[in-house]
Structures are given as C-alpha cells and as structure tokens.
Image (spheres, rainbow, N blue to C red):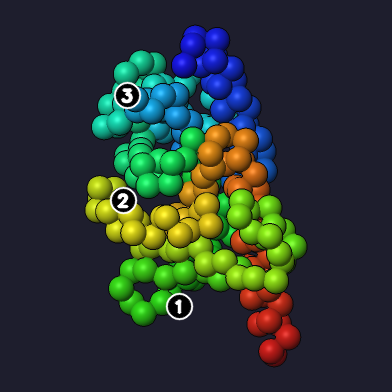
Amino acid sequence: MSDANTTALAKALSSAMGEIHQRGWCDGTGGNFSCVLSQQPLRLLMAPSGVHKGSVAPRDLIQVDGEGHVLSGQGKASAETALHLEIIKVCGAGAVLHTHSQAGTLLSQWAIDQAAGDGRGALELKSLEMLKGLEGVKTHDCSVFVPALANDQDLSALSSRANPLLADAPHGLLIAGHGLYAWGRNLGSAMRHLEILEFLLEQRWRQLLLAAITAR
C-alpha cells in the first residue's frame, strides 16, 4: 500500500475508533481495532495496547506483522492480535473491530451460561429487519447464530478454538464477559457489521428483559 493510502487508512481507522468510543462500545482502554495494510506479506495497522481508544490519532497507530510483532510505531500490540490474525486468515477480513459494549459483554456470558458446558455456545438473532444489514442476509425472516466462546487469557488457545467457528459466523464472534469481534472485507464493511450486530445485541438484551418482566 502506498504512503498516501496508508495515511488515508490511518485517518479512517482513527476516526472509526473515535466514533465507536462515543457510542459507548469501548470505554477506557477497552477494545482493539485493526485494518489490513497488505496481504503479502501480511501487515496490520492497529491501535497500540493499553491506550484510550477514543483519542488515538493516526500518528499513534502501530504496524504489526503476521506474527503479531510490531514493525513500526510506539507501543506494543495487544495480546488479542492473535485472534485478529485468525479472523483475517479464515474469513479474508480486511478489518476487525473488537468492542466491549454492555450488551455484547452481558450476552456473550449469557450465551455460554446457556450452553452445554464445553465453553462454546451461540446467540440466536432472528426476525428483525436489521439482519439484512449483514452481508449475505436477504430477509428479516431468518435466524443467524453468533458463536460464543469462553474467555481465555491464552490467546493462542482461544484463537485455535475460534478457528472452526469463523467461516460460518455472521461476521461476528462473542467472547464471554468480554464482548464482540466484528469484521468485514474492509473498514467500511466491518463498521457496518459492527453497528448492525451491536443493534441486534441490544435488541436481544431488551427482549430477554421484557420477557422476564412479562413473566412476573
């Protein structure tokens, strides 16, 4: 990618992170975000670990190789870079956006709690017009299942467990008590999928709350 294109992508990623923070989806130092700069060799543009994601300027972004090593920029790569790389490898993603919204954090844990106990589950989202915002979905009259995994500080192990679930995932993956990973062919596509999935997660949370109130 040319220097001009890299600069433009850095500005776009910085702007996207600011918007995501304003929407309350990555408070404090939460969340991590990446875009693919090149495939051969694989190089990512990312926010560094441990910084406030709502105030990362384009110049603050780092470049990371396919092994998660920092190639340029100040700061270190998030340990969760491993999962970004797995999603990019399996799904051909051009951008990966990881958020810590209230709905994503709550429902990711709930999906695991409802599952069989093997650390894997899925959250069903169905019968909502906004489903059509997900690439490949043509009608509201359907269900999609967002896979969920128990959290693990061993990101290599977590990425390995995620691998067989990613190809059929609806552009999103939940990590229990941790939130949502959303992705797309490019940053614009990933942002669209993130917005749609966060909307659907918020709806599911409210549906469960409404059902509990109605059942009293």
Of residues 102 and 143, the one drawn nearer to the viewer in this rendering = 143
| Kind of residue sitting beneath label 3 | Pro
| Kind of residue sitting beneath label 2 | Ser
Q: How many circles with numbers are drawn on the protein? A: 3
Question: Considering the numbered disc 2 on the image, is that residue within a helix, a strand or a loop?
Answer: helix
Report the Cα–Cα distance between label 1 and label 3.
41 Å
Q: Position of residue 48 (x, y in %)?
A: 41, 28
Q: Position of residue 141 (x, y in %)?
A: 70, 71
Location of mark 3 (residue): 41
Image quarter in which the C terminus is found: bottom right
Whether the residues at callouts 1 and 3 have beta carbons within 8 Å, the answer is: no
Location of mark 2 (residue): 159
Q: Position of residue 114 (x, y in %)?
A: 45, 78
Near mark 3 (Cα within 10 A), the count class, few <14, some 14-19 or many ≥20, is few
Query: Which residue is painted at 71% across and 64% down in the image?
Result: 139
**Image check: 97 left or right of 200?**
left
Of residues 187 and 59, the one drawn nearer to the viewer in this rendering = 187
Location of mark 1 (residue): 114
Q: Which of marks 1 and 2 is nearer the N terminus?
A: 1
